Amino acid sequence: MESNERNYTLLPFQYKRWDKDTFFIVNECGDYNFIGYDNFSSFIGHGLSPEKSVFRDLKSKHFLAENDLSTAIELMANKYRTRKSFLRDFTSLHMLVVTLRCNQNCEYCQVSAESDQAHQFDMKVDVAEKIIERIFEGPSKNIKIEFQGGEPTLNWPTVVAAVEKAEELNQKYKKNLDFVICSNLTTIDREKLDFINCHGISISTSLDGNPEEHNKNRIMRNNKDTYELFEQNLKAARSVCGDNSISALMTTTSANVDNLCGVVDEYIKMGFNGVFFRSLNPYGLAAENRSDLGYTIEKWLESYSEALDYIIQKNLNGTYFVEYFSTLLLTRILTPFSTGFVDLQSPSGAGISGAIYDFNGDVFPADEARMLARMGDDYFLLGNVFHNSFKEIFNGKKMHEIIHESNVETLPVCASCVYQAYCGADPIRNYLESGDIVGQRPESEFCKKNMGVFDLLFKKLKNAKEEELDVFWSWITRRSLEEVRCEIYDR
């Protein structure tokens, strides 16, 4: 009796039942496919005919190989190395907490900022300069130095000293050097803006929605109108530094979770061309006030889905506007390239892609780890710039533990998850929620949120019309819809 088995080899992949008629499969390097039930059964049973188009599709995407197994493995390895290329750029993002003082008292503040008179929480100039020296000991050719707080402009002399020290050292090291300052913009003035513009510093700010929503979330300690001051200083900053030098993100609370489409309108009104829908993180005041500010992950996903549809339609109607979180995920799904988003890397980007330096020179692998220390637990403390070298800080026992325990390829549940190739681990949040850096995936809000967004995006990709895919590619490539369509047409 003739066997129905075909001579081909299955290559590694994860899968899940998408619906009663379809399986969804993803391989190790992120290629995906939707395949009918009968074809899937034939495929895994080595009975799929090479004459079928689905066979050729699976072969081209490296789900199977015929007599070219070594070539297929080599091609997959190249893609896999590209996806993991962030490991070669160790460590590129360095965040300096130049002060914990802040002139705002936001109810969701994750760092539990101090009053604007608490000068004991300012980073001294000598601390900043020592941090800069440590940063330049690292191997990365690309360095981004980000000034955080509190409100970093309240300790302006330290910001100036750090920028000038970095530029001085870079005359020797010749690295690709960038600066960002994270500011609420309420204390900015012309002198600071001139310095920011002169040294090519990008500004990252925050806008949580319309005046009512923004003022409810972001409260001035002197009770002044936050939104009005923000709007005034945003215009001043753009007049000096240019429109493209300023970006904004928002935090979702109970005040705006039901109006994310309205938040989009506010961003467009304010002249921004994108928004990052950030959910609450369980640190600092955000954790203490969660009963008032919080919502379920299911509620956030429902609002996010509605807002994403709204944004896509805005683009189709001629307004270029990006949702940055979905763009990060789509980049990981539709291209082999890695992204700089720390939360979606395996091993975790904490310490590998970025690190944060507290006002006293203590070093943590991520901002969340520093927030955890502010809450009384310094489990993730890597060292101090005065007591430890770059190698001791970033090649010590704690970093080894983080790396070892944050590979989704080997973590329980993650190891068999169909979204493994696109996702990452958050050891700090795992530790906070479960007391263990491996964590418990079934109870993890981090996991529920990412799984929900992946489900949403793949549902869109599976059913998308060409015009919607054009919108996604315009976000990924940072080009207008017209430019994307022209390139496709020219091809």
Image: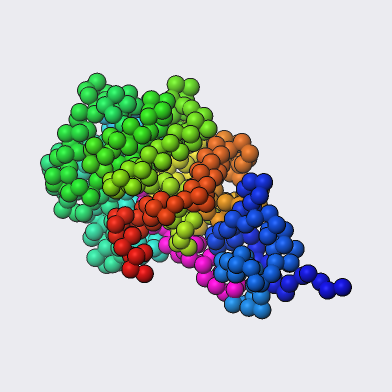
Q: Is residue 140 visible?
A: yes
- Looking at the rendering, in which quadrant would you find the N terminus? bottom right
Total numbered badges shown on the rendered structure:
0
**Image quadrant of residue 57?**
bottom right
Above or below, comparing residue 361 to residue 474 in the picture: above
Position of residue 471 measured from the top left corner of the image (x, y, whole percent): 37, 52
Magenta segment main secondary structure: helix
Q: Please tell me which residue lies in front, 297 or 306.
A: 306
- Looking at the rendering, in which quadrant would you find the C terminus? bottom left
Q: Can residue 387 be seen in this view?
A: no
Question: Relative to residue 147, is residue 77 drawn left or right?
Answer: right
Q: Give the range drawn in magenta.
A: 72-95
Residue 329 within the magenta-colored segment of the rendering: no
Position of residue 7 measured from the top left corner of the image (x, y, whole percent): 72, 74
Q: Which residue is drawn at 32% across and 52% down?
A: 145
Position of residue 46 measured from the top left corner of the image (x, y, whole percent): 73, 67
**Image quadrant of residue 265?**
top left
Render colour scheme: rainbow
**Image quadrant of residue 223?**
top left
Q: Which residue is drawn at 36% across and 43% down?
A: 313
Q: Residue at x 50, y 49 (%)?
A: 463
Q: Which residue is drawn at 47% across and 50% down?
A: 464
Q: Please tell me which residue lies in front, 171 or 307.
A: 307
Position of residue 24 measured from the top left corner of the image (x, y, whole percent): 61, 53
Residue 82 within the magenta-colored segment of the rendering: yes
Q: Please tell me which residue lies in front, 160 or 269.
A: 269
Q: Please tell me which residue lies in front, 371 or 15.
A: 15
- Outermost residue, right direction? 1
Above or below, comparing residue 362 to residue 139 in the picture: above
